[in-house]
Image: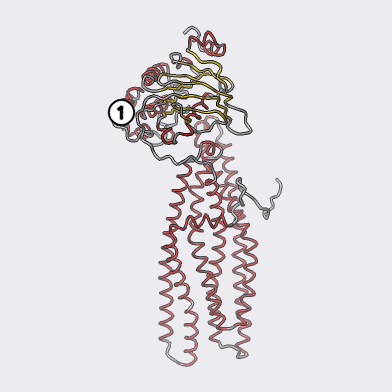
């Protein structure tokens, strides 16, 4: 494997620097903290007061030493020193609590915004991403905002002000020792400026690897039975462990650079102490400063340690946060649909569908899936789409639902281009049963009412009867309240399909789109579902994609598609006589004389 230049600039797939702190980073950060700016400011002021209160402690110590030398009472100095210690601790405790609470609020806001955006992403954007990686941006990446949104900003500013104030106080003690201290501490700034970008890149790589772990786990758990049936546990384990090792390597790289920063800061402080102690001792010996001033100066020097640590930590956290903001920002750059709030389905007259010269391809580098597809489906009745795999049948439904936009031509619903329909209105008019008939985790009732949350018990009972699910509900231990498991794992394939059909019917749609809705049904239930669809076709427009022609022989019209084109339209009997492809499909399924 070729060596990677750690200093080389890297960019995201959107062309932006990987986790570098830029003006865009500050702008994005401000958007997160702006709603909480007043509370953060109060916490910052409290923290600053607590820190500045501590600056009196070295002075109190100096006065205590002076009192010892003069024989004066120590009571006043001790009380002042004790009061400053207690007051500073209490104020800092309140400040820390307020900051931590605000950080949680920032994370909550970020997660709400990100989840809302993920739900509104266009279908191609989600299909081109890894679900596990998207999930990690909601979980682990937003957690990193805690560090940068409050701790890095407030602690960094507080530490910087405290550092300046401490240096000013030290200047009153002895300018020569101050010059020695600043010269040694200058090493920190040089090291930090070189190392911090490397910490940022390593953190970004680590977070990306964590996202790949989520994607790998989602891939494995989503096909858990297939993994076991294929004896692929060891291979999947190796794949996930390789990804985990990538995250480990990136984390180790970040830890290495962070340790260099920490060691350099600690070394600079220790060298400063030794230099001040040596030079200060000489100045005390030559009566150029008092022993009390030297002690106070040394105390201020040690007081610089938390300030320097706070500044270094804030800069480091800002780099880490920049990596998280960059990954979250990549989601913001993905294509989204216009906001579509929940829309209660309303019964309307059946709709008509028209395709006018529609061309479509999934990506520019891929061939056309549709090549000037034209057909018309009148209101009511059932229209079936048949043809070999890859003919573009399912894509018809995706274009009607506006999951994708046609490359050319128009898709019309009731004579109106679907792109002119508000998304909420368009999809509220459609009941869609996908090819794999997904069932969501939750109860059976949750799944049935997913598209019609206001459905009444009578409406649910009726749709259960129509789809022959009423017997299933009676058998289930808790009826409609029975939990169906992850992706409906507690239901059979045929039961999941019938649940999906019932969910679509409960919406009372103007269009009912059924994509291979009977592929997992036995002959008895397939016949029953055909009756259900025929009944629905009397009051709505039903479009069916099917490979099993027994499902569609009674359709009012059948659209035969091949290689992205419509080659014939007619009834089953007409097409058996007039279209060789359809006749071949019917013959292979023993339906040529049906």
Q: Residues within 10 Å of mark 1 (few under 14, many from 20)?
A: some
Secondary structure category for the residue under label 1 = helix
- Quadrant of res 369: top right
Please state if 216 lies on the left or on the right of 37 as rendered. right
Q: How is the image coloured?
A: secondary structure
Percent position of residue 241, x then y? 58, 43
Q: Residue at x 42, y 81 (%)?
A: 80
Q: Residue at x 46, y 24 (%)?
A: 353
Tally the marks. 1
Percent position of residue 537, x then y? 39, 20
* Residue 347 in the image: above or below residue 308: above
- Quadrant of res 273: bottom right
* Residue 207 in the image: above or below residue 269: above
Question: Looking at the image, which is closer to me, 303 or 128?
Answer: 128
Percent position of residue 397, x then y? 49, 27
Please name the residue that numbered disc 1 is placed on.
Answer: 459
Please state if 393 lies on the left or on the right of 454 as rendered. right
* Residue 249 in the image: above or below residue 561: below
Q: Quadrant of the N terminus?
A: top right
- Quadrant of res 539: top left
Outermost residue to the right: 2
Question: Looking at the image, which is closer to me, 404 or 151?
Answer: 404
């Amino acid at each position: 494997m070729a060596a990677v230049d750690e200093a080389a600039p890297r960019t995201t797939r959107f062309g932006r620097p990987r986790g570098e702190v830029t003006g865009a980073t500050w702008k994005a950060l401000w958007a997160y903290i702006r709603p909480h700016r007043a509370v953060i400011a109060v916490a910052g002021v409290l923290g600053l007061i607590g820190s500045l209160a501590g600056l009196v402690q070295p002075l109190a110590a100096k006065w205590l030493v002076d009192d010892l030398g003069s024989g004066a009472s120590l009571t006043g100095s001790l009380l002042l020193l004790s009061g400053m210690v207690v007051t500073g601790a209490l104020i800092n405790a309140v400040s820390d609590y307020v900051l931590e609470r605000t950080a949680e609020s920032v994370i909550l806001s970020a997660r709400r915004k990100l989840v809302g955006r993920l739900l509104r992403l266009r279908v191609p954007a989600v299909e081109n991403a890894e679900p596990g990686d998207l999930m990690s941006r909601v979980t682990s990446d937003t957690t990193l905002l805690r560090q940068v949104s409050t701790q890095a900003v407030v602690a960094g500013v507080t530490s910087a002000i405290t550092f300046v104030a401490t240096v000013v106080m030290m200047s009153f003690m002895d300018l020569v020792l101050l010059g020695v201290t600043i010269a040694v501490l200058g090493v920190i700034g040089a090291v930090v400026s070189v190392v911090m970008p490397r910490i940022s890149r390593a953190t970004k790589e680590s977070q990306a690897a964590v996202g790949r772990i989520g994607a790998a786990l989602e891939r494995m758990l989503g096909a858990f039975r297939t993994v076991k049936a294929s004896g692929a546990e060891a291979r999947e384990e190796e794949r996930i462990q390789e990804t985990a090792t990538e995250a480990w390597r990136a984390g180790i790289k970040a830890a290495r650079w962070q340790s260099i920063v920490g060691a350099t800061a600690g070394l600079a402080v220790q060298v400063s102490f030794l230099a001040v102690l040596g030079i200060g001792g000489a100045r005390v010996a030559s009566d150029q400063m008092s022993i009390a001033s030297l002690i106070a100066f040394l105390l201020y020097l040690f007081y610089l340690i938390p300030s320097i640590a706070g500044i270094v930590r804030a800069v480091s956290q800002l780099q880490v946060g920049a990596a998280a903001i960059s990954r979250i920002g990549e989601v913001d750059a993905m294509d989204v649909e216009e906001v579509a709030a929940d829309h209660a389905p309303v019964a309307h007259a059946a709709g008509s569908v028209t395709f006018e010269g529609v061309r479509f391809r999934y990506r520019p580098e891929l061939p056309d899936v549709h090549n000037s597809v034209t057909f018309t489906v009148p209101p009511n009745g059932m229209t079936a789409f048949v043809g070999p795999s890859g003919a573009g049948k399912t894509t018809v439904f995706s274009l009607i639902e506006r999951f994708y936009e046609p490359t050319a031509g128009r898709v019309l619903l009731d004579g109106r281009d679907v792109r002119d329909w508000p998304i909420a209105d368009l999809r509220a008019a459609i009941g869609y049963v996908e090819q794999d008939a997904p069932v969501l985790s939750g109860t059976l009732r949750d799944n049935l009412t997913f598209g019609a949350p206001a459905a009444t018990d009578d409406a649910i009972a009726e749709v259960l009867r129509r789809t022959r699910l009423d017997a299933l509900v009676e058998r289930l231990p808790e009826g409609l309240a029975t939990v169906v498991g992850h992706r409906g794992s507690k239901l059979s394939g045929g039961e999941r399909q019938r649940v999906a059909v019932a969910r679509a019917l409960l919406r009372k749609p103007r269009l009912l789109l059924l994509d291979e809705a009977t592929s997992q049904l036995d002959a008895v239930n397939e016949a029953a579902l055909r009756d259900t669809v025929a009944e629905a076709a009397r009051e709505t427009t039903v479009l069916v994609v099917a490979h099993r022609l027994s499902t569609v022989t009674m359709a009012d019209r059948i659209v035969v598609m091949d290689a992205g084109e419509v080659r014939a339209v007619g009834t089953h009997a007409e097409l058996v006589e007039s279209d060789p492809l359809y006749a071949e499909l019917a013959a292979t399924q023993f339906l040529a004389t049906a």
